[in-house]
Image (cartoon, rainbow, N blue to C red):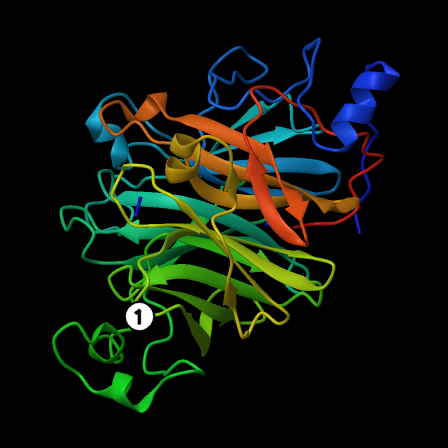
Amino acid sequence: MSAPPSGGAFFLRLGAAVLAALLVGAPCPALAEDAFKPGEIWNDTAGVPINAHGGGMLVHDGTYYWFGEHKTEGSAGNRAQVGVHVYSSKDLYRWKDEGIALKVSDDPASDIVRDSIIERPKVLFNRLTGKFVMWFHLELKGKGYRAARNGVAVADRPQGPYRFLGSSRPDMGAWPMNVREEDQIQGPDKHLANDFALGQQSRDMTLFQDDDGKAYLIYSSEENQSLHISQLSDDYLKTIGRYLRLFPGTPLEAPALFKRQGHYYLFASGVTGWKPNAAYSAEANSIWGPWQMLDNPVRGAAEDVSTTFGAQSTYALPLPDMPDRIIFMADRWKPQNAIDGRYVWLPVEWEHDKPVLRWQSAWRLPVQSSIKRER
């Protein structure tokens, strides 16, 4: 396993008592058709199960776009057989299939040839270039998880088609801002120094676009023993050699970064292959830190706390006109039958300004008036 448009309003057909419960994140009784049901099969508007795993979200011109890995049946579906799927929605409940945004290649010389590994695609809109930029974790065909690269693709429309530009490792020949002298010496298990000339390993990843338009790649590195935050170039097509190590020596992956009231927050998971594990959370006043590790954000039964409801984080979505409202997006992986992976979306709650997650078998959004920002 290793983000100045306006949109249409949507309103909840609920009684006053139910709406009051929802606004504080309470479970939703008397469900109608508009509800999130974590872990259940989620069909698109054509009645076909949504196929967008390890996903990320883009908001553009009043529409949500959900990008994710297109899985196929069996264990072969853990490798890329089709490409990156994209769906669109006005309300986050009903999703229209927009097709394959980035197709695998039939060229055996291509980095994204069929049977390569394409994971966790994320897309940002670049206001300077007018392009939509996709990043994803890429492993080369037949090399397992040894390549540890990022792929980059661009498009003129949010739904694509996306044109693959190439792949690389980030921050080749650059040290992180918080590097220690002893970490610059090569040796056994000295991954930061050993990968200095080739670029840092990048596996599970996400993108984050800040309010000033700057964008960042957040990824699991150093054999998944650290997270890195790397600033992207103005056109979002590469890293610029300015990056930070987060919690070196702590096995972390599945990052999801978001901002609330001027503070930066991070969800992540431990490293246990396809098996679910306990979640991590962290916060900082600046994206460059210092970052402080918080408690496990999950509240509930012991099994839920130790397995993050049987799921793993992939993205954190602030509602565009309600930035204090965050949706935690996660996946339940099914490596023996990849296409049967399920989605777990939950509202982020807050305890003493710390993010927490509680299980809800079904829930709805509060009233949202419009979509105002891209992310």
Say what secondary structure mark 1 lies in.
loop
Q: In this view, does 49 lie above or below 335?
A: above
**Of the pair 289 and 314, the residue shown nearer to us:** 289
Q: In this view, does 59 lie to the left or right of 334?
A: right
The answer to whether residue 177 shows anywhere in this view is: yes
**Of the pair 101 and 246, the residue shown nearer to us:** 246
**Of the pair 296 and 200, the residue shown nearer to us:** 296
Q: Which residue is drawn at 52% across and 24% down?
A: 38
Q: Which residue is drawn at 65% across and 50% down?
A: 375
Q: In this view, does 80 lie above or below 152?
A: above
Question: Residue 95: percent from the left, percent from the top?
Answer: 60, 23
Type of amino acid at the residue the image marks with label 1: Gln
Q: Is residue 322 left or right of residue 304?
A: right
Which residue of the protein is positioned furthest toward the front in this rendering? 302
Question: Residue 214: percent from the left, percent from the top?
Answer: 62, 68
The N terminus is located in which quarter?
top left
User: Residue under circle 1?
Assistant: 200
Q: Is residue 156 left or right of residue 5?
A: left
Mark 1 Cα-neighbour bin, 10 Å: few <14, some 14–19, many ≥20: many
**Of the pair 66 and 274, the residue shown nearer to us:** 274
Q: Residue at x 37, y 55 (%)?
A: 151
The answer to whether residue 11 shows anywhere in this view is: no
Q: Name the image quarter holding residue 368.
A: top right
Q: Is residue 163 left or right of residue 71?
A: right
Question: Residue 237: percent from the left, percent from the top?
Answer: 49, 64
Question: Residue 195: percent from the left, percent from the top?
Answer: 24, 75
